[in-house]
């Protein structure tokens, strides 16, 4: 019988493991690989709350908060891509997650997922990049106003960190007075909404976000470069970035075209890659259109499924 490597004895779900808060759900399968989820900058594992419970009905799942986010302890600064990748590798080792596994990364987490797959190819059975960040976004390939906004975002995270340290943002979040955030988290379960309100606007979370984004913008840390070749890969692109035909060209249209081009470049990383464009979705596709992400992950699970055959002497259902 061809079986996957079984995970060892696993700690209880929802605990701290080496300083990182992780939640394990589902049961390790002999046929399907585990699925590991990587959240984006400034978020927490709760953004996967509409997705991972459905995948956990099929196989084991791991969601976790990177250092500084959610319930995780602050990590060593600066938060470079190398540190984030190595933190995940240590967590996978500590929890005894079976390899290879499917890695699902959103936004900046998608950038980290690519780097992980390049650095540890034997760990990865498949890759899902959900509106993933790309290194071209911080280079001359993008319109100058976009590059300036990227740098401005680092400064805004820094100002938000100071506001959190002074107690202002946590005070506003406790009263749910942060404009737009309530609408963003509204589709999530109540427990996840409450966790997001209490976590995202804390000093530790914003310090981690500032450092991660600063390292990304300055290319501090490794940047993935190599092809993934035949690795099963799904590139999911939010509908709001679909390029539109317009006689009047402007920065917005140029940005849409360039973002679409980066998605095509990511699709080109693998000979078997698929590009999925999600109509009606914002950047957080897993919140706006969770069914799409669930479907994409399920398709990769089937692609990476291990077929099992009866052992000699077992009843095969007939003679």
Image (cartoon, helix red, strand yellow):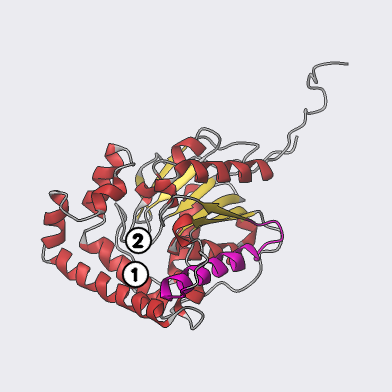
Whole-percent x, y for residue 118 in the image: 60, 66
Residue 67 as seen in the image, left or right of residue 231: left
Name the quadrant of the C terminus.
Answer: top right
Q: Position of residue 34 (x, y in %)?
A: 56, 44
Residue 168 disc label: none
Q: Point out the residue furthest to the right here.
A: 319
Q: Main secondary structure of the magenta part?
A: helix
| Relative image position of residue 50 (x, y in whole percent) | 41, 40
Name the residue at 41% across, 54% down. Answer: 282
Q: Are marks 1 and 2 in contact (CB under 8 Å)?
A: yes
Q: Quadrant of residue 115?
A: bottom right
The quarter of the image holding the N terminus is top right
Q: Looking at the image, is 228 positioned above or below residue 197?
A: below
Label 1 crowd (10 A; few <14 / some 14-19 / many >=20): few
Instruction: State the residue position of label 2.
Output: 67
- Left or right, residue 291 beside residue 172: right
What is the quadrant of residue 235 in the picture?
A: bottom right
Q: Is residue 233 visible?
A: yes
> Element at badge 2?
loop
Q: Secondary structure at mark 1?
A: loop
User: In the rendered view, would you say 202 is above or below 13?
Assistant: below
Residue sitting at x 39%, y 42%: 49
Q: Earlier in the sequence, mark 1 or mark 2?
A: 2
Coordinates of residue 168 in the picture (x, y in percent):
11, 62
What residue do we see at 21% from left, 63% from top? 203
Which residue is label 1 attached to? 76
Q: Spatial distance from mark 1 to mark 2, Cα to Cα?
A: 8 Å
Q: Could you say which is closer to the camera, residue 19 or residue 46? A: 46
Q: Is residue 315 above or below residue 107?
A: above
Q: Looking at this view, is 314 or 228 the one in front?
A: 228
**Which stretch did the figure color magenta?**
248-274
């Amino acid at each position: 019988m061809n079986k996957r490597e079984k995970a060892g004895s696993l700690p209880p779900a929802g605990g701290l493991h080496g300083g990182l808060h992780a939640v394990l759900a589902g049961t390790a399968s002999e046929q399907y690989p585990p699925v590991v989820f990587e959240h984006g900058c400034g978020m927490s594992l709760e953004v996967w709350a509409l997705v991972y419970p459905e995948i956990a009905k099929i196989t084991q799942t791991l969601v976790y908060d990177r250092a500084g986010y959610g319930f995780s302890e602050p990590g060593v600064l600066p938060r470079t891509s190398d540190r984030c990748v190595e933190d995940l590798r240590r967590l996978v080792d500590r929890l005894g997650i079976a390899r290879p596994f499917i890695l699902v990364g959103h936004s900046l987490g998608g950038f980290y997922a690519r780097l992980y797959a390049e650095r540890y190819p034997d760990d990865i059975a498949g890759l899902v990049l959900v509106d993933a960040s790309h290194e071209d976004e911080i280079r001359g390939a993008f319109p100058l106003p976009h590059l300036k906004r990227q740098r401005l975002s680092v400064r805004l995270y820094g100002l938000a960190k100071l506001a959190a340290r002074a107690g202002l943002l946590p005070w506003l979040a406790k009263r749910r007075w942060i404009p737009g955030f309530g609408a963003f988290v509204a589709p999530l379960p109540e427990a996840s909404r409450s966790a997001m309100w209490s976590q995202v606007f804390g000093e530790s979370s914003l310090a981690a976000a500032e450092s991660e984004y600063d390292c990304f913008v300055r290319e501090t840390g490794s940047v993935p470069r190599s092809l993934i070749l035949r690795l099963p890969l799904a590139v999911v692109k939010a509908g709001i970035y679909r390029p539109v035909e317009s006689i009047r060209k402007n920065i917005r249209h140029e940005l849409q075209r360039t973002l679409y081009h980066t998605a095509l470049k990511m699709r080109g990383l693998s000979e078997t890659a698929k590009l999925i464009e999600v109509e009606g979705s914002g950047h957080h596709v897993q919140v706006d259109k969770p069914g799409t992400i669930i479907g994409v992950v399920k398709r990769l699970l089937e692609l990476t499924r291990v077929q099992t055959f009866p052992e000699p002497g077992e009843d095969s259902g007939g003679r």
